[in-house]
Every structure is written in structure tokens, then in C-alpha cells.
Image (cartoon, coloured by chain):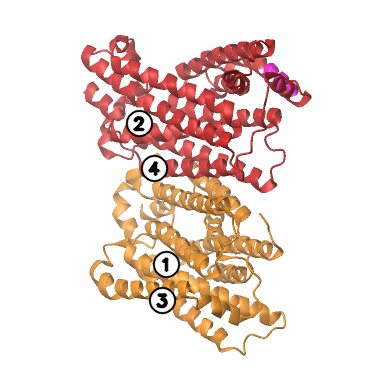
Chain colours: A red, B orange
Amino acid sequence: MGFSMDNMKGFILALLSSGFIGASFIIKKKGLRRAAAVSGVRAGVGGYYYLLEPLWWIGMITMIVGEAANFIAYAFAPAVLVTPLGALSIIVSAVLAHFILKEKLHHLGILGCVMCIAGSVVIVIHAPQERAITSVQEIWNLATQTAFLLYVASVIVLVFVLIFHFAPRYGHSNVLIFTGICSLMGSLSVMSVKAVGTSLKLTFEGMNQLVYPQTWFFMLVVLTCVIMQLNYLNKALDTFNTAIVSPIYYVMFTTLTILASVIMFKDWDGQSVGSIISEICGFIVVLSGTILLHSTKDYERSPSRSIYPPLLHCAADAELLKHVDDDIQSSEEFCLRVQ
Amino acid sequence: MGFSMDNMKGFILALLSSGFIGASFIIKKKGLRRAAAVSGVRAGVGGYYYLLEPLWWIGMITMIVGEAANFIAYAFAPAVLVTPLGALSIIVSAVLAHFILKEKLHHLGILGCVMCIAGSVVIVIHAPQERAITSVQEIWNLATQTAFLLYVASVIVLVFVLIFHFAPRYGHSNVLIFTGICSLMGSLSVMSVKAVGTSLKLTFEGMNQLVYPQTWFFMLVVLTCVIMQLNYLNKALDTFNTAIVSPIYYVMFTTLTILASVIMFKDWDGQSVGSIISEICGFIVVLSGTILLHSTKDYERSPSRSIYPPLLHCAADAELLKHVDDDIQSSEEFCLRVQ
């Protein structure tokens, strides 16, 4: 366990990022609620009044700050450390939702939070040291080693097969198609984000990397991958419930990103078997915590599994609930509005 | 991470122990079911026909073998390693119940199993090396160091206060009283079991320890503590639901045992901060997994929280269920018999 200064910076940035992103959901939701209260029309059923609501914009800015912090974190610490910590944003939003939006956090949800934290601690303790990179060409060499090129090639082939063969046939019945495309592209975008981030970091430190074509190539890759990722994430969210898409996406995306990072940056070289196994276990624990948080969130929503008897009278609205943008309201609020 | 031969032996024995104890629950339950089918009277309502059922006795023997393996495990490996692995017996019985008794395992229960395993792996990887002990007098010296004597004194004072002040007043309304007494005594019995186990191990290796009065003193302590522990565990189980008692007891017992072991055997001396934190996280994860398994088991039982709609028709029997020895039947079986 050697926790370098750079790992520490990356770790703190990742924490800040999770804090901002987690808070942004709550602020946006509060903005949406307020907009719905003023206009009487919900975003989920076609209203755009929320664009006039300052709170929604504050939430949007908080989110952008969070994503930026996440981006910079990748320049300092290995993806094996930064990516799983993204789960902490779920905790932040669950806890804030409990106190600010007064959405009840199920006791198993609290357990999920505890697990995410315990798993994150194990990951942080065993995170590998990043090798010091002094130029974008070094990253280029890492990205063009045979093993990583093979990974990139298989990702591209898989994505093509998914887009042109599976998506038209099963995209709307199987949740794994769209989320799979997102996750595969996501692992490439994180790797190129890391390359761009490191180049910018070096440039700010006085070693200008913008003169190298590789820097611009990586920027192009980031742009392409992120746009594809957003596009298919939207398709997935349009087709399936957020409560189903989020954990599946998180699991696939994080797993593939760690795989890509391990292949490209050889994160696990020189680490003891014990550390690697601990990291994997920590990762499994964080995943389980995330799944638990999401499943129990579902209990509150879906009346057939409801744990809170007062919500049982919403049973008739179960079908309706599915069709309303489920990011926007808790079922309590929904019940109030329907009756 | 140094995994010594003795740690390995203790680890394997602890695994075997969990396997036997987990299986014993299932065998006993099958025996009880068969006895109830033959006699028409359940153990929970006063029948003792199960004593004529060979399957029940096989289960009892399996359990004794498991407890013996656990006992020997303590002679080889530190309590910090052996005690948390006890949670694996819950997994064994949950998995066997799924396949043999056809009790459905809730999907969150599976998540609980995964967590118990991941947490156990982290604990095993970071388990401290036990110092080699060559005589019972060495253990005696460890047991009579000031720090451990202070621990023993506070345990005894606490137990007295709980028994004579709190038990008569709140014992039947607060689940923490009886389970607290059990757990406090339990931490002392594990320490003395470890002393007796080590003495017997040394005796078998040719260094007779039975000539020392300390060995007999530790045996006396084991006997006293175990009897008190069983007595108050029975009281707790008589008064409260198994589903509530088990996880609370497991959490308190394991925490106090680890605390006692760390004080007496100085398990954490010479370990890195990272290893200690990892162990604690692993322990928290195992605890969370256990709680999750128990909570979701509860979902199947209590109709108001039921996840399986077919069980909803048992709602009227909810009150009855509480009064029947709930170790004995799954709610499905209960429904079949009541209607």
C-alpha cells in the first residue's frame, strides 16, 4: 500500500466529483418540482417550464463542475481507483434526498450506502500507483501496444455488431443491448479522457503537449465516444426504467473501464496477488451496494413490492408510473397529484 | 500478506465448520418436517416426536462435528480470521434451503451471499499471523496482561448490571439485553476456547499441558461461559423472533470477539494500517451481507412485506406465525398446513 501524492489528489477530486454530481440530482429535482408546481405541467409529460427555473440551472452547473472534477481526477490517479468511486455520488444523492426531498431511505438502502463506502475504502487502500507519465507520446505508446489494440478492436467489432445486428431486433426488448453499447464506448472514452487530461496537466505544468498530433487525436476520440455514449444512454433511458438501466450500466461500464485500464496502463503489474484480489472484492462490494440501493429504491416506487403501507393505495397507478419520467417525482408526490 | 501454514489450517477448518453447521440446519429442519408429517404435531407447539426421527439426530451430529471443527480452528488461526468466517454457514444453509427445502432465495439474499464471500476474502487476505505459542503459560501471561484484565473486568461488570438491573425490567421488551449478555460472555468463551484448543493441540504434539492448572482453569471458564451463553441465547430466542435475534447476536458477538482477540493476542501489532482498515471493512461487509440475508428472509415470512404474491393469502396467519418456533417451517409449508 503506497498512497502517492498524485493518488491522493485524484482521490480527493473523485470524492468532490461524486459530491457535486450527487447534489446536482437533488437540486435539479427540486427545480423540476418547483417548475411543475408553478406551471402545472411535468417535464415527463412534455413541459419545458423547468428551463425557466433557476434552481434547475444551478443543478446543471453543479453537475458540470462535478464532471470536470471527475475528468481531472483521471489525470492524477488510475482509472481502477477513480471509476468505482463514482458510486459514492449515488450515496450523496440518496442521503440528500432523504433530508432535503424527504424521500424515505429504506433501511436496506442505508446498508447499501455502508457497503459502497466499505468497498471504496478497500479499493482506495489497494489502488496501484500510477507510473509517472512525462509526455503524450508515452500514452500513445501505451495505447498502441498489441494487447490494448486487440481490446480496442474487439470493442469496435462488438459495438458494430450490437448497433447493426442486435439493436434493431432486440434493442427495445433487451436492456443489455443499448447499455452494452454505452459501456463499451464508455471504457474507450475514459481511456482517452485520461490521455487528454494527462496532456492538459502536463501542458499546465509547462510541457506543452498541444504541439503533438496525438493530443488532438485523443480529443477526437473523447468527442466521438462521449457523443455515442450519450446517444445510446438516452435510448436506453427512453426505453427502460432508470432503476433498471442505472445499476446495469454502472456494473458494465465500471467493469469494462477497469479492464481497459488494466490492459493499457498495466495497473496490476507489480501488485501483490492479495492487493489485486482485495481490489476485485472491493469492487464487487461497491457493485453490490449500488444494486442494493437501486433495488430498495424500487421497493418504494412499485406498489406490488411496497414496504410502506401508505403507498399501497397507489396500486392502480402502477402502470401510469412507468410511463412518467421517473427521475422527476417520488411516488408520494405522484399519489398526491393523481388523486 | 503472509499466509502461514497454521492460518491455512485454521481457515480450512473454519470453512469445514461453516459447511457442517450450515448443512445441519437443513438436515434438522427436514427431520422436523418429517416428524411433523408423521405425528401431526409441530415442535413449536409442544411435540417431541422429532426425537424419534433419525434425520434430526444426523443433523445434531453434523452440528456437533461443525462446532468441533470451529473449536479446533481457533487453535490454529487468530479469532480475527475464524470468527467472521462463521457467517459462511448462513450462506451454506441459505443455498441448501433453496435447493433441498425448495425455499426461494430472494435475489437480494443472493447479493447478501456474494457480499459475505467478498468480505470474507478480504478478511482472509489481511488476517494477521498468529504468534507461535509453545505452552499454556504463555497464554496465561497474555490473559493476565493489564489491558486484557481490564477488558474481562468490564465484561463481568456489564454482564452483572445487565442480568440484575436491566434484564428484569427491559429483558422482554428490548432485544439488546439478552443478546448483549450472550455476546459479552461469548467473547470470553472464544478466548478461553482458544486457550483450551491450543493446550490440547500442544498436548497432542507431545507437550503435555494437562499438568498445568491453567489448562483446567481455562476449561472451567469455557464451561461457565458457554452455559451462560446458551441460557441467555435461549431466553432471547424464546422472547424475540429468530430473524431479529440472529443478526444482532452475530454482529455483537463477532465485534466483541474481535475486540477481545485484538486486546489479548495483540493481533494487530505489526500489521500495516492498510491491512487493519481492510480487515475492518471486510468485517463490515460480512456483517452487512448477513443483515441483508436475514432481512430478505424476513420478506418471505411476514406477509405485510411479502415479495411473493402467492404468499399474500397467508396474511391472516401473520400473528400465528410469530408464536410458532420459526426455525422450523417456511411460510409456504405453514400455509399448506393451516388451510
Residue type highlighted by circle 2: Arg
- Residue bearing the label numbered 4: A110
Q: What residue range appears in magenta?
A: A149-157
Say few, some or many: other residues with alpha carbon within 10 Å of mark 4 (under 14 / 14 to 19 / 20 or more). some
The quadrant where residue A199 appears: top right
Of all chains, the one bearing label 3 is B
- Tell me the residue at 63%/21% (across/down): A195
- Residue bearing the label numbered 1: B183
- In this rendering, the answer to whether B198 lies above or below A213 is below
Q: Between marks 3 and 1, how big is the CA–CA gap?
A: 10 Å
- Magenta region, main secondary structure: helix
- In this rendering, the answer to whether A338 lies above or below A116 is above
Q: Between marks 4 and 2, how big is the CA–CA gap?
A: 17 Å
Q: Quadrant of the N terminus of chain B?
A: bottom right
The answer to whether one can see residue B46 in this image is: no
- Residue bearing the label numbered 3: B228
Q: Please identify, in this view, whether the residue under mark 3 or under mark 1 is nearer the observer.
A: 1
**Residue A22, how many percent across, how many down?**
40, 29
**Residue A38, how many percent across, how many down?**
21, 14
Say few, some or many: other residues with alpha carbon within 10 Å of mark 3 (under 14 / 14 to 19 / 20 or more). some
- Residue bearing the label numbered 2: A301
Query: What element does badge 4 sit on?
Result: helix
- In this rendering, the answer to whether A241 lies above or below B21 is above
The quadrant where residue A157 appears: top right
Callouts 4 and 2 on one subunit: yes
Residue type highlighted by circle 4: Ile
Cβ atoms under marks 2 and 3 closer than 8 Å: no
